[in-house]
Image (spheres, rainbow, N blue to C red):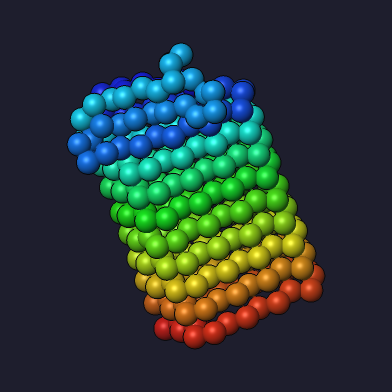
Amino acid sequence: VSAILSGADLIVGGDAAANQIQISQNAAGDVLVQGLTGTRINGRPSVTFPSVNLIKADVKMGGGNDQVTLVGLSTDNDINVETGNGNDVVRLSGLAAGGVLNVKTGLGSDTVSGTGLAIEGDVGVVIAGGNSAVSLSSSSIGGSLTTITKDGSDTITLSALTIDKDLNVETGKGNDIIRATDLVIGLGAALITDEGADQLVLTRVSTGEDLSLETGKGNDRVTMSTVASSKS
């Protein structure tokens, strides 16, 4: 795995191997890129970039069953994470971004989780396909949240989120589960599933505009408790 600092942009690149990395930033601004379980960073166990005011962070892994953990990163602009085909795991904790946060994974049974996020722009999670899981909790989003999973039996769990604009969740064919709990959404929300025996569970969800639920063919179940929409 390679890691460089281009100006104030952090750029991390993987290869076709199954890599495990953790990228963290402390209060002094030091950025540590660490290889786990034998993964090397620039040929070494880890690399440190001292006292950095990050503008942007781009992490692009190759194929293989990769694991990427980001802890405490703060950027003036965007944070982008992309993995290739394989059963990948992306963990995000305590991130702050003045721009957008984008996570994109390739084909495989992938897991994406995030907690304690403070993102001023949009957040997007796109999974290309496979039996995957997305979990986002205890976070604030200044723009919209969009989560898209392609075909596969997926589980989307959203809890304790404040979203200033729209929420859009879309799953492909498969027996999917969408759970939304304690969400405050400034504008509208649309939750859409495709064919399969899907479950939508909404608890303590409020929207400032339209709330739309749509399921495809299959024996679907929709459960709502304490749900409020200012329109419909």
Residue occupying image coordinates x 51% and y 51%: 113
Indicate the quadrant where residue 79 lies. Answer: top left
Residue occupying image coordinates x 39% and y 77%: 208
Vertically, is 231 above or below 61?
below
Q: Is residue 31 visible?
A: yes
Indicate the quadrant where residue 31 lies. Answer: top left
Q: Camera-side residue: 130 or 66?
A: 66
Q: Position of residue 46 (x, y in %)?
A: 40, 23
Q: Position of residue 91 (x, y in %)?
A: 48, 45
Q: Is residue 187 visible?
A: no
Q: Is residue 47 left or right of residue 199?
A: left
Residue occupying image coordinates x 34% and y 30%: 32
Vertically, is 193 above or below 36?
below
Which residue occupies the extreme front position in the image?
A: 37
Q: Position of residue 103 (x, y in %)?
A: 49, 44
Vertically, is 42 above or below 109?
above
Q: Camera-side residue: 81 or 34?
A: 34
Which residue occupies the extreme right position in the image?
A: 218
Indicate the quadrant where residue 229 lies. Answer: bottom left
Q: Position of residue 56 (x, y in %)?
A: 32, 35
Residue occupying image coordinates x 32% and y 41%: 73
Which residue occupies the extreme top position in the image?
A: 43
